[in-house]
Amino acid sequence: MTLGMRRTAIASGTALLLCLGTVDTAIADEEPPTSSASDTEQPVATDDVADQDGVDINDRADWEDGEATSVVNPHYCDGPQTWIEITSKKNYHVPSWWNGTKYKDGPGGKMKVSVSKSGTIGMEITAGAEAEAGAVLAKAKTSISVKVAGSVTITTGHTYTRNIANHKYGHLQYGSWGYKVSWKKLRRRGDGCGSPTLVKSGTATLPTKETGWKYWETSS
């Protein structure tokens, strides 16, 4: 091969390489680069992470229960205390025993009476329990009726008429339509966590401001 032919061949090869380079560049511009799996992988949220057994750590049914039962709250008591309880009650006509508020007549006929003397009807409590009267009254107001009172004033008047059955004697007693109750006083000592101890118990008659006549009959 002559020198001229050799130069022509080298020139042709160089032109071919330049052409191929231009084509590769165009292809690279037209096609997006291929990304590897490591480039496209998104970060995993911690809420979706499963434990080694394949169970979602936030789907464990006993997760909250286990945490709640592991907390032990200390128990506090009320300390030493004393209180009153009303154990029974019944409607009771609390009488006014002074003269001019109680009458008897018969046999048979008709009674017409009125309060001729004023006075006061007071609460009565078991002898020896006078110190508990205020506490019993306060408890009765909250557990029985707000109408319960320590004392009720009776004024003159309030006329009443009643027929008496044949061969019977009629009785009329003025008073307050109140209650008769049983009560007990309890106490807890120390931290107040133990069972209460009975201190005292008894009965009490409690008047209200509702007053009037009570009627009954006897054979003699």
Image (tube, rainbow, N blue to C red):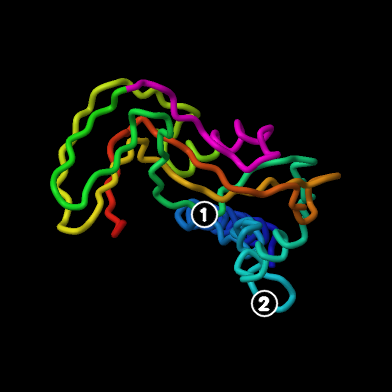
**Picture layout, residue 20 above or below residue 79:** below
Task: Give me the residue at 70% from left, 39% from top.
Answer: 128
- In the rendered view of the protein, which quadrant contains the N terminus? bottom right
Q: Between residue 187 and residue 193, name the one nearer to us.
A: 187
CB contact under 8 Å: marks 1 and 2 = no
Residue 145: image x %, image y %? 41, 39
Q: Which residue is mark 1?
A: 88
**Picture layout, residue 213 above or below residue 59:** above
Mark sitting earlier along the chain (1/2): 2
Q: How far apart are the two marked residues, 1 and 2, measured between alpha carbons? A: 65 Å
Instruction: Specify whether residue 87 is in view.
Output: yes
Quarter-of-image position of residue 125: top right
Task: Give me the residue at 66% from left, 34% from top.
Answer: 130
- In the rendered view of the protein, which quadrant contains the C terminus? bottom left
Task: Give me the residue at 50% from left, 29% from top.
Answer: 150
The circle drawn on residue 181 is none
Q: Is residue 196 magenta?
A: no
Task: Report the amino acid beneath label 2.
Answer: Gly
Task: Report the amino acid beneath label 1.
Answer: Ser
**Picture layout, residue 2 above or below residue 73:** below
Q: Which residues, given as a range, are shown in magenta? A: 117-138
Q: Which residue is mark 2?
A: 54
Could you say whether the residue bearing mark 2 is in a helix, strand or loop?
A: loop
**Picture layout, residue 114 above or below residue 189:** above
Residue 134: image x %, image y %? 60, 31
